[in-house]
Amino acid sequence: MKNFIWLVVGVGLGFVVAHEVNKTQQGKRFFTDLDAKTREFGEAISEGYRKREAELHAALGDAEDTIEELSKP
């Protein structure tokens, strides 16, 4: 319970500090850059996931074709 209270206090202080920093011009630039980089990272992860998913679907299709050919008399 004690650790949970410290976690809540830390999150609250972090929120207050971030809010105060965001009021400055440099803070706004920092958070804008951070947001852009975070979106870029998320898009890269998503793109990589879609590519790998396509590779796996292609491999699965090849395996199904091979199994079908081998099961023919």
Image (cartoon, rainbow, N blue to C red):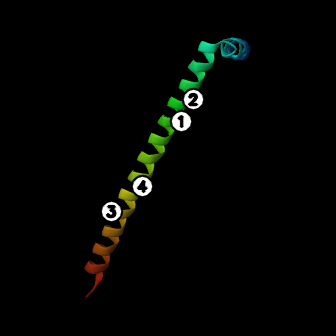
Of the residues shown, which amino acid type is indicated by label 2?
Asp
Q: Which mark is residue 35?
A: 2
Of the residues shown, which amino acid type is indicated by label 3?
Ala
Q: Alpha-carbon distance for marks 4 and 2?
A: 27 Å
Tell me if label 1 and label 2 are in contact, CB under 8 Å: yes
- Is disc 1 surrounded by few (<14), some (14 to 19) or many (20+) residues within 10 Å? few
- Residue topped by disc 1: 39
Q: Position of residue 35 (x, y in %)?
A: 57, 29
Q: Position of residue 40 (x, y in %)?
A: 49, 36
Q: Alpha-carbon distance for marks 1 and 3?
A: 30 Å
N-term-proximal mark, 4 vs 1: 1
Q: Which mark is residue 59?
A: 3
Local secondary structure at mark 1: helix
- Judged left or right of residue 5, residue 38 is left
Local secondary structure at mark 2: helix
Q: Quadrant of residue 29?
A: top right
Of the residues shown, which amino acid type is indicated by label 1?
Arg
Residue at 49% across, 42% down: 43
Tell me: residue 55, above or below residue 7.
below
- Is disc 2 surrounded by few (<14), some (14 to 19) or many (20+) residues within 10 Å? few
- Residue topped by disc 4: 53
Q: Nearer the viewer, residue 38 or 69?
A: 38
Given this view, does label 4 or label 2 mark the residue nearer the observer? 2
- Is disc 4 surrounded by few (<14), some (14 to 19) or many (20+) residues within 10 Å? few
